[in-house]
Image: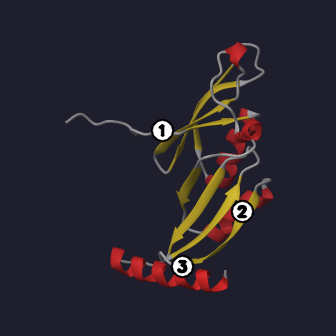
Amino acid sequence: MTHREDQLIPELIVRNGPAAVEFYKTVFGAEEVHRMMTPDGAKLAHAELTLDGHKFFVCDEFDASEGGTCKSPQTLGGTGVRVTLFVDDADATVQRAIGAGARVNMPVQDMFWGARYGKIVDPFGHEWGINQQVKEQSHEETQTAADEFFSKRRDCA
């Protein structure tokens, strides 16, 4: 069987692609593989980054007259996608993100699936789940913990 690269490569559409690339490098430790600007240097046509050996792409938003078909979360007024990132230290990652302009949607906290987890929105409108697995659990243990977690939430409603 032939080795294949990542079969699923997300591409994040942003406003100010060069700043987004720097954010992902600084906050998440992404490595820049390649960057291509438009001929006039005004927009990021394509950037390839790797994060823990996995690719993702970043591209500036282009309007329809420029051949663009995708919109940034800022244009859409939100995003329909959350990217979850597994990290060694969720608290430190979120603090770096805040320092670089992200906002917190959910503070890092202990979760029923055995993780420290929080959610941020980067300065470009993309939501990230920041997950630090601290305890390995079976599917059954996780389901029991989830049932307990959600039953307590109903009690508070």
Labels 3 and 1: the sequence-earlier one: 1
Tag 3 or tag 2, which sits nearer the N-term? 2
- Amino acid type at image mark 1: Ile
Residue 108 visible within the image: yes
Amino acid type at circle 3 is Phe
Q: Circle 2 sits in a helix, a strand or a loop, which is it?
A: strand
Mark identifier at residue 150: 3
Give me the disc on residue 105. 2
Residue for point 67% across, 68% down: 92
> Which structural element holds mark 1?
loop
The residue sitting at 75% across, 39% down in the picture is 19
The quadrant where residue 1 appears? top left
Image position, residue 24 (x, y; %): 66, 47
Which residue position is annotated with label 1? 9
Distance (Cα) linking label 2 and label 3: 20 Å
Q: Position of 86 compared to 43: left or right?
A: left
Q: Which of marks 3 and 1 is in front?
A: 3
- How far apart, in angstroms, are the residues tagged by discs 3 and 1? 33 Å
Image spot of residue 67 (x, y percent)? 65, 16
Label 2 Cα crowd, 10 Å radius (few <14 / some 14-19 / many 20+): few
Q: Is residue 47 above or below residue 133?
A: above
Provide residue 145's location: percent of width, then percent of height.
46, 82
Relative to 61, is 121 above or below? below
Foreground of the two, 70 or 16: 70
Which-is-in-front pick, marks 2 and 3? 3
- The Cα atoms of the two marked residues, 2 and 1, are separated by 25 Å
